[in-house]
Image: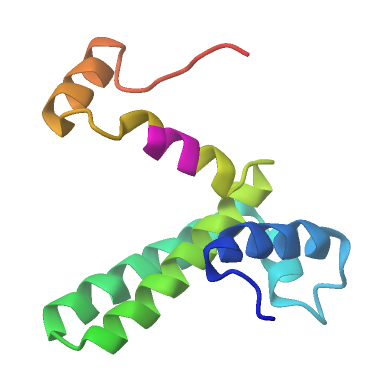
Amino acid sequence: MTADPNDILARLAATIAARRGADPADSYIARLLSDDEDAVLKKIGEEATETILAAKGGDARHLVRETADLWFHCLVLLGRHGLGPREVLAELARREGVSGIAEKAARTKRGGQDREKE
């Protein structure tokens, strides 16, 4: 029996969390987590640019691969902040069925970001 592909984000987040204490010489994730946050931010910028170029190039498979790279590095960034796909998916669920225009207007009213106190 194979694992549910819909759980891949949770599995990746678990792997990222597990690699936090690994040797950066042995693990790419550990290296990204041990470096200054700017290293991850730079990588996300590179992957976003590559995703845009892939979309402009019209090669669907290339676009999928670059999007996977972008999502992966975003998961690493979330992990650096003690967050994971669950929080992002919850936010997407909260927005589901809400007009994008209305949602953006609500954020603008709140000062651009939703900063709820926990």
Q: Position of residue 7 (x, y in %)?
A: 59, 62
Give the tally of numbered discs: 0
Q: Which residue is drawn at 82% across and 82% down?
A: 26
- Residue 114, placed above or below residue 68: above
Q: Residue at x 71, y 62 (%)?
A: 16
Res 53 quadrant in image: bottom left
- Residue closest to the eye, 22 or 98: 98
39 vs 89, left or right, is: right
47 vs 58, left or right, is: right
SS majority, magenta? helix
Can you say which quadrant of the picture contains the C terminus?
top right
Q: How is the image coloured?
A: rainbow
Res 104 quadrant in image: top left
Can you say which quadrant of the picture contains the N terminus?
bottom right
Res 63 quadrant in image: bottom left
- Residue closest to the eye, 106 or 93: 93
91 within the magenta span: yes
Q: Where is residue 108 in the image (x, y as percent from the top left)?
A: 22, 18
Q: Position of residue 92 (x, y in %)?
A: 38, 39
117 within the magenta span: no
12 vs 99, left or right, is: right
- Residue 25, placed above or below residue 15: below
Name the residue furthest front. Answer: 1
Segment colored magenta: 89-93
Q: Residue at x 22, y 84 (%)?
A: 60
Q: Which residue is drawn at 77% across and 77% down?
A: 27
104 vs 10, left or right, is: left
Q: Where is residue 62 in the image (x, y as percent from the top left)?
A: 30, 87
